[in-house]
Image (cartoon, coloured by chain):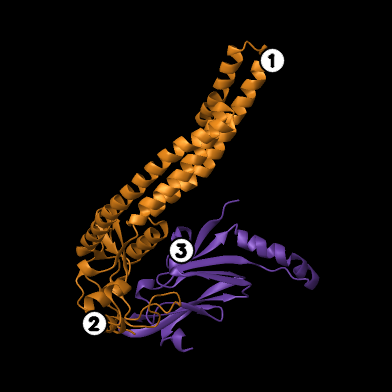
Amino acid sequence: MALGIFTNFAIGALPSFAVSYGTAQPAGQVFSQTLIGGAAGVAGGAAGRIVAAPLFRAGQAIGFGATAASALAGAGAGGVAGAIYGGATGYATSGTLRGAIEGAEQLGALGFLGGGLAGAGNSLFGAVRNSYIGTTIATERAAALENANYAQKSFSKAFSTDPEALFPGKTIDDVAGAIRSGQLAPKDVPVQYIVREGNSLILNTRSAQALEQAGIPRSQWNAVNMTGDAGAEARLTGQLQRNGLTSQGTSTVAPTRGN
Amino acid sequence: MNSSKKVLYTVPVASTAFESGGAYMLLGTIRYNFDRDGVNRRSGIRFKRIKATRTYSESASNAWHIEGAYDTLVEIENSPWVEELQGNTADRQRRIGETWEMHHYMIYLDSSGTFEVIAESWEALPEEAGSWPNPMTI
């Protein structure tokens, strides 16, 4: 920020110095023109940046859409941003309207070209990146649950009655049956887990049991990595401690004998 | 002044093993059912002269709610919530000639969330045979 202001001040001040030196104007006039030029530089640069930054981001955001429109949108956004920034900078450096127009034309054209290329590039990059990231995350999560253990020794057959719960009042049998019949998809039954000391530990025992009971392989579970979430980590610690387990958890879990 | 937690009581079985969908609060009592040696049992924590309550679902409970309070009733010492309530009711207490004793209690129970109560006192209900009604049917 400080460097930016300094740069703009210098850009604005330089022409003033040049004009003043060439015409041998009095020192006081040189100083005042320098100040005016510097202030214009600061204001022009700041205004250009304020306007250009969101427009450029908009161009980028639209560019991620992986469509041909993104290139046009990027070009449009880049052109407008470049024109505004160029106009502001041109005015700041020349102190004239003509300078501003020339600056706007030059940087506007560059911005149009750059924005178009950026938009198209972002489309392609976004598509490839999202595909890669999506595949990688799904694979990593599924792998994390493949050998995951439980953090409790026993579980109730009934899901929480808390109104915010996913299946309030339902039993594991109910949910497993709904999965088997297609009323629920495996993705509708998320299973949170945490990786602690190299061990993957399941936080939602009943959801996992319903999926197991429905015969859904762990590779198809909707795994949600909660590692690093302070609340989830604290809950896991509580589960392990109250069940007398270490961070290895347990691979076997049994239903309680009640309801 | 920072708040701190004083341990008061730990529930008799892990809340991960509570039956009937976990714990719930009704009429000033946190109720829970569990299995002991194949027999349905019930117990709870009753609060007396409750002035305020608030609950956080499991997903809305944060680390502060859980650490030290998992399955454990704690008293929040130097509670800003008590301070607020005392301030809001100071004039009323003076008018009616009473001084309200307020304690901030908190417990986190797995799958049920955080229960917070401002009350005069608390007591653990004796463990007994039977089950509390399912809250979905009350």
Q: Amino acid at mark 2?
A: Arg
Mark 2 or mark 1: whose residue is earlier in sequence? 1
Above or below, A55 against B62 in this view is: above
Q: Which mark is residue A28?
A: 1
- Gap in Å between the C-alphas at discs 2 and 1? 88 Å
Figure chain in purple: B
Horizontal and vertical percent for residue A235? 39, 63
Residue tagged 3: B69
Q: Chain of mark 3?
A: B
Q: Residue at x 80, y 70 (%)?
A: B95
Q: List x then y, in percent, for residue B87.
A: 71, 62
Residue that extends furthest to the front in the rendered view of this protein: A98
**Visual hue assigned to chain A:** orange
Give the structural element (helix, strand or loop) at label 1.
helix
- The kind of residue on which mark 3 rests is Ala
Label 3 packing within 10 angstroms: few (<14), some (14-19), many (20+): many
Identify which residue, A92 or A42, lies in the foreground.
Answer: A92
> Label 1 amino acid?
Gly
The secondary structure type at the circle numbered 3 is: loop
